[in-house]
Image (cartoon, rainbow, N blue to C red):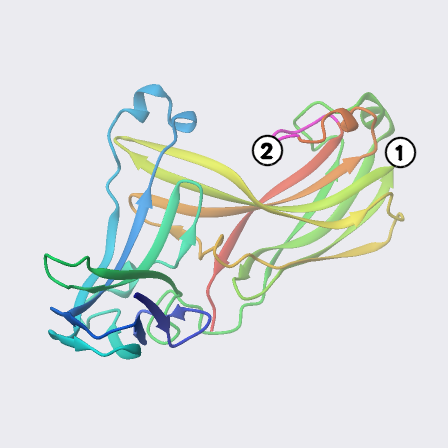
Amino acid sequence: MSVELKLSRSNRIYRPSEALEGKIIVKTQSSISHYGIRLTVKGSVNLQVRGGSAGVVESFYGVIKPIPIVNRTIEVKSSGKIGSGTSEIPFSVNLRQRDENLERFYETFHGANISIQYLATVDISRGYLHKSLSATMEFIVESDKENSADLQQQPLSPEMAIFYITQDTQRHPLLPELKSGGFRVTGKISTQCSLSGPISGELTVETSAVPIHSIDIQLFRVESVLLGEKIVTETSLVQTTQIADGDVCRNLTLPIYVILPRLLTCPTTLAGPFSVEFKVAIVISFQSELSKLHKKSDAKTPRLWLAMETLLLELVRTK
């Protein structure tokens, strides 16, 4: 005896103005009686602050209550019987009521301290003598394409930022040979882009006295949570994309093209109790015997053999 949820869309992506539709599939060897089949849709923003980022005192400040987005229950079927074999029971529930604000429906996001999640749960009540049957499935919410005021109406042309990276732009210590020999890397990269498009740009190594080991584009998320009267902010690495391996040719233009991960990114969100922002970093690693001793180094910690440039990145949802 089992129950499962099957949504109408294989990608499980829905928008606030749409109805969540699908089927409840019940498999049983014999017919069973029930006292009603109910479907519950819940969405919430779950916030947490880990002791390492908040400190000992703040970590005992109290549990941060989830921020409710939606909590709706419908009766799919009144009490009755389900026949033996496989039964498929269709359902449909509106995610948003007419009087609800669209801005409350933040996009699905899974971060380190902030998680925005939407769940559909079916419950088949069988009375006190039998265990209830239930199943839960996560579905994904994206900004509404028709009614959201924040949604870009026209295709977004990425805003480009020009950058240059030299030994003089670095705020952390460098290897002596990098300081004395010098290097210069120039280019441009998008600082505002659509979630459905890539981070794009180009990069040129003009000069470098020390051979280059690799060039990477790193995407960071910056999560801020309001805790009491202070804001706790934590930056964490989302993904690293290598665009060059080895000592690249000088004065050769390299393309930058980075696909954004779906569940680990969302539109840049500035809400009252929390915010989700993003940064993009161009990281140049130079060949050094010292780097071989620290293969697993923290991406946020600048090393003697690294040079980098970090820029704010605004992510938006477009039509």
Closest to the observer: 112 or 272? Answer: 112
Q: Which residue is mark 1?
A: 209
Residue 295: mark:
none
Tell me if residue 302 comes above or below residue 65 in the rendering: above
Image: 71 above or below 225: below
Residue 128 in view in this figure: yes
Residue 55 shown left or right of residue 289 in the figure: left
Front-most of 239 and 313? 239
Three-letter amino acid code of the residue under disc 1: Ala
- Which residue has dot 2 on it? 300
Viewer-side residue, 77 vs 227: 77
Amino acid marked by disc 2? Lys
Q: Which residues are magenta?
A: 297-304
In this rendered view, identify the residue nearer to me: 90 or 245: 90
Query: How many marks do you count on the picture?
Result: 2
Q: Position of residue 276 (x, y in %)?
A: 42, 47
Instruction: Judge left or right: residue 70 versus residue 51.
Output: left
Q: Residue at x 16, y 59 (%)?
A: 130
Residue depicted at x 61% and y 41%: 310
Residue at position x 46%, y 47% in the image: 277
Q: CA distance from mark 2 to mark 1?
A: 25 Å
Q: Are marks 2 and 1 in contact (CB under 8 Å)?
A: no
Indicate the position of residue 72 as horizontal and vertical percent values.
19, 64
Q: Position of residue 167 (x, y in %)?
A: 76, 31
Q: Main secondary structure of the magenta part?
A: loop
Q: Quadrant of the N terminus?
A: bottom left
Other residues around mark 2 within 10 Å, as few (<14) / some (14–19) / many (≥20): few
Residue 298 lies in the magenta-colored region: yes
Residue 284 magenta: no
Outermost front residue: 30
- SS of the residue under disc 2: loop
Q: Which of disc 1 and disc 2 is earlier in sequence?
A: 1
